[in-house]
Amino acid sequence: MFGAGDGNSANYLWDGHRVRAVDFEESGRSDRAYELAEIVEHVSARGPCPFDTAALLRLFPLTPAEATRLRDCRTLLALVWLFLLAHDDPAHPRNPPGTPERQARRLRRRLDGTA
């Protein structure tokens, strides 16, 4: 399947009826589990207006194989975000203070199986 490849919530527009993707810079061949993981693990999902991850995921009935892949992709992407956030320039931060620490806790919960 074709996927957007970038879960930044700013890349999706919701008009109350349909969602439209507007950024295809990272797009390409993908699958549902990876695309869902991209959306729910993107740091923008926990911004000033976080969305209900569980409610979103309930909208997509997944096969057992997809559910396993979703879990694995979420953990991988949580790790990717920790690396990205850990290298934020302290002199010119792009994220609110404490974001890397919150991401480290999020990754730990994913690894512990509690998130």
Image (cartoon, helix red, strand yellow):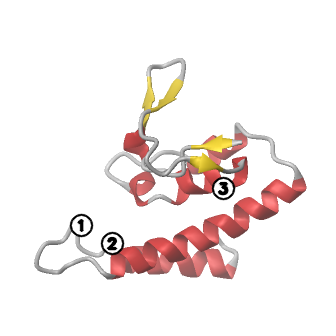
Whether pointer 1 and pointer 2 mark residues with C-beta atoms closer than 8 Å, the reply is: yes
Give the residue displayed 35% in from the left and 54% down from the top. 47
Looking at the image, tell me whether mark 2 or mark 3 is earlier in sequence order: 3
Is the Cβ of the residue at disc 1 closer than 8 Å to that at disc 3? no
Question: If you read the primary sequence from the N terminus, does the residue marked by circle 1 or circle 3 appear first?
Answer: 3
Name the kind of residue labelled 3 in the image.
Answer: Tyr
Q: Is residue 9 left or right of residue 17?
A: left
Instruction: Kindly indicate the quadrant of the structure image that contains residue 98.
Output: bottom left
Q: Is disc 2 surrounded by few (<14), some (14 to 19) or many (20+) residues within 10 Å?
A: some
Residue found farthest to the right: 64
Q: CA distance from mark 1 to mark 3?
A: 26 Å
Amino acid type, residue under disc 1 in the picture: Pro
Tell which tag, 2 or 3, sits nearer the viewer.
3
Residue named by callout 3? 34
Q: Residues within 10 Å of mark 1 (few under 14, many from 20)?
A: few
Percent across and percent down for residue 109 are 59, 77
**Residue placed furthest toward the left:** 91
Which numbered marker is on residue 96?
1
Q: In the image, what residue type sits under mark 2?
A: Thr
Q: Secondary structure at mark 1?
A: loop
Looking at the image, which residue is at 22% across and 66% down?
A: 94
Residue at 42% x, 34% y is 22
Where is 86 relative to 53, above or below? below
Q: Which residue is mark 2?
A: 99
Q: Is residue 84 above or below residue 8?
A: below
Q: Which-is-in-front pick, marks 1 and 3?
A: 3
